[in-house]
Amino acid sequence: MFSLIILTMCGIVGYVGTSPALIVLLEGLERLEYRGYDSAGVALIENGRLHVDKKVGKIRELVRSLWGKELKAMTGIGHTRWATHGEVCELNAHPHTSCSGDFALVHNGIVENYRELKQKLESLGIEYKSQTDTEAIVHLIDLNYEGDLLKAVLKTIKSLKGAYAFAVISTREPNRIVAVRYGSPLVVGVGKNENFIASDIPALLPFTREVIPLDDGEVVDLRPDGLFIYDFEGNLLTKEVMHVPWDIISAEKGGFKHFMLKEIFEQPRTLGDTIRGYISRDIILPFSLRDFRRVVVVACGTSYHAGLVGKYWIEKYTRVPVEVAYASEIRYADMPVGENDLVLAISQSGETADTRFSALAMKEKGATLLSIVNVMGSALDRESDHTLYTHAGPEIGVAATKTFTAQMAVLFALSVNQSESAQEKMENLLKVPHLVEEVLSKSEKVKELALKYANSTDFLYLGRFLNYPIALEGALKLKEISYIHAEGYPAGEMKHGPIALIDEKTPTVALAPRDRVYEKMLSNIEEVLARKGKVIGVGFEGDETLRKVCTHTIEIPQVDEDMTPFLTILPLQLFAYYIADYLGLDVDQPRNLAKTVTVE
Ligand code: M6R
């Protein structure tokens, strides 16, 4: 099952009930916009016939094309497509319809044997209209239909190879949606006289907070008055309904210009919520990290940076060696792993393919799999031996912010848990939300500097020790939302190469709180200044030396060195945000990126 690894980032929404489906579909699709997409479409069963509308571009284009059409259908499916097979055009956009015109289907993932299936379909005289792999599925369902949509789907999936999630409707059974999960996320929303399907929980939140995340290898049969879940053999399964604790407000912008800005400013609360979940010494886990000979952290992007910070804390407080690996790299590295190892997978979404499958490969070799995830019920959550949640609520901005600080909070609690100084250390952590609020209240100064440097084309971010991963994270934030080249580097390593980049046009952001490497950082800052580089120093309040040395300073409250990453990252998040906003860029949905990367 876990060899199926090539998935896509598209969005699926489906509705069957007693209200107009179109409203649900459009609202749901809008809430999936953050996944990244290039076209959108809906299919509805209107007066016994299929009505399909698709458009290239944003959902507003689709809304425009639907304008004035009085569609009262109570069954429908919708989709946002992120192209994998076939160019971006209306023909390739979903939903796809079958040869008879009676079936419509939306799909995430890749059908790996679609060429073979297409050939078979064409040999039967079926005209293949698009360049997609998806179209094969809907034709097959049509061919396999003998009066029962569920049976046709169960028969069809036997001939599919790959990883996918799809939802299908048919005019022959207008009050029914059948959907399948096999490698790509899919969640059922449970309503009263109505039921929903979506690829992600935020799409369901305006309508219901009662959900059932499907597992790989499950099929759901949805009708207005009930739903049934089966395995691929057609055996009925019993699944628990989960209550989603988020409210819809937390998935909306709440007065901020962008989700990213809202999420940055939410950090005092999200950190407070996360820390409160780990305040007791004993509740965290049934084992101690010291029971293992090694901890292997696997993660991607921002979650990987959180893992790098966690390494310092875990090694300091438990003396257990930690390796932090990019999930995409370690997966094919043949690393010796076994029963004595703890794999710590870190993922906001819990759906990142690289993270999931590298962690699962190690679990299969006998390692214990512990995960830190934000999305309860996500694949990684369900696949892990134990999960620690970040209680950060839904993160909509593609650039991770509040989930990064929440991940660090969980990592810190995990590191000090069961150490002699646990109580004292957790008291330090408890003070963090308030300090975060204090730093954020001085955002204007960061904005001023951001506007001053917004036209620079290259940046260097330097840090050492606990703030080296923060330099990496600050550079990643700037790259992904402002498209400005930025390099994060360990400050002491700079003289071995990157120092050649320094000139008067390349500003450096230097993280220099008064920690054990402070003096060394000052020397590294001097090295930059000596080469005419401008330096924005991030350091402690009242640090006269730093003020004198740097071109500009951004100040954070004085804290124990362990707590510095929680504060130094904040100006860097804001700096990236204000530059991207000043440049007029799409902050929440940067080009080429998707919130959840379910492709390898
Ligand atoms: O959901 P995950 O934490 O597994 O996602 C990992 C990365 O894709 C993610 O952190 C990505 O780097 C973000 N765009 C960073 O802002």
Image: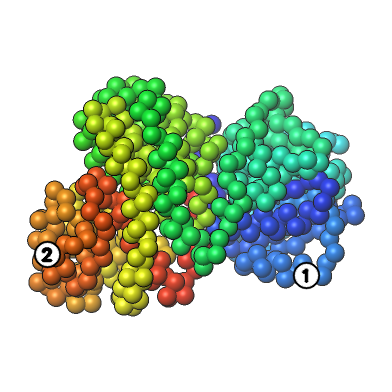
In which image quadrant can residue 501 be found? bottom left
SS label for mark 2: helix
| x, y percent for residue 57 | 62, 67
Whether residue 430 sits left or right of residue 539 in the image: it is right
SS label for mark 1: loop
Question: Measured along the vertical axis of the image, is residue 122 above or below residue 130?
Answer: above
Colour convention of the picture: rainbow
| x, y percent for residue 513 | 20, 55
Q: Nearer the viewer, residue 123 or 562?
A: 562
Whether residue 142 sits left or right of residue 352 in the image: it is right
**Residue drawn at (77%, 57%) of the image:** 22
Q: Is residue 327 visible?
A: no
Identify the residue under disc 1: 67
Whether residue 186 sits left or right of residue 481 in the image: it is right
The residues tagged by marks 1 and 2 sit, at their Cα atoms, a distance apart of: 63 Å
Question: Measured along the vertical axis of the image, is residue 394 above or below residue 477?
Answer: above
Q: Is residue 261 visible?
A: yes
Select label 1 or label 2 by which is in front: 2
| x, y percent for residue 279 | 38, 34
**Residue drawn at (27%, 59%) of the image:** 556
Q: Nearer the viewer, residue 552 or 179?
A: 552
**Residue drawn at (73%, 54%) of the image:** 24
Identify the residue under disc 2: 545
Q: Amino acid at mark 2?
A: Thr
Q: Residues within 10 Å of mark 2 (few under 14, many from 20)?
A: few
Q: Amino acid at mark 1?
A: Trp
Whether residue 181 sits left or right of residue 412 in the image: it is right
In which image quadrant can residue 562 be found? top left
In which image quadrant can residue 29 be found? bottom right
